[in-house]
Image (spheres, rainbow, N blue to C red):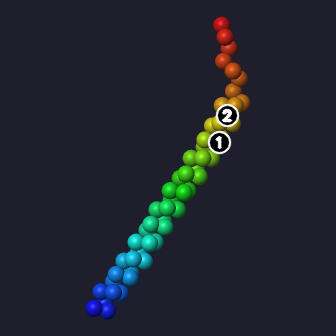
């Protein structure tokens, strides 16, 4: 019985660490995407307006 409790505790720790790693990866991806959007916005703002013929 005690062994099952230990296994469950280990599984819970593993699950929590996997969730934390997944959330960290998602946050990192969001930050990267936000950085790219800011760069794209700056680049678009620096482009000259299209000329009319």
Relative placement, left or right, of 41 versus 11 is right
Q: Using the image, determine if residue 3 lies above or below residue 42.
A: below
Q: Is residue 26 left or right of residue 11?
A: right
Q: Name the residue under label 2.
A: 43
- Residue lying at 31% horizontally and 92% vertically, measured from the top left: 2
Question: What is the quadrant of the N terminus in the image?
Answer: bottom left
Q: What residue is rendered at 62% in x and 47% in y?
A: 35
Compared to residue 3, the image places residue 37 above or below, namely: above
Residue 48: mark in rendering: none
Q: In which image quadrant can residue 44 be found?
A: top right
- The x and y percentages for residue 21 are 48, 65
- SS at circle 1: helix
Residue 4: quarter of image: bottom left
- Residue 49: x %, y % from top left: 69, 21
Q: In this view, does 18 lie to the left or right of 36?
A: left
In primary-sequence order, the first of circles 2 and 1 is 1
* CA neighbours of label 1 inside 10 A, class few (<14), some (14 to 19), many (20+): few
Question: Residue at point 50% right, 59% down?
Answer: 25
Please identify the residue farthest to the top as the structure is shown: 53
Q: In front: 28, or 16? A: 16
Q: Position of residue 29 (x, y in %)?
A: 53, 53
Figure check: 4 above or below 19: below
Label 2 – label 1 distance at C-alpha:
9 Å
Please give the name of the residue rendered at 71% of the width and 23% of the height, measured from the top-left corner: 48
Q: Residue 47 placed where, x, y %? A: 69, 27
Q: Quadrant of the C terminus?
A: top right
Left or right, 35 with respect to 7, comes to right
Residue at image mark 1: 38
> 10 Å neighbourhood of mark 2: few (<14), some, or many (≥20)?
few
């Amino acid at each position: 019985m005690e062994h099952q409790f230990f296994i469950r505790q280990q599984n819970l720790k593993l699950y929590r660490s996997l969730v934390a790693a997944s959330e960290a990866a998602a946050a990192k991806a969001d930050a990267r995407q936000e950085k790219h959007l800011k760069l794209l916005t700056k680049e678009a703002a620096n482009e000259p307006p299209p000329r009319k013929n």
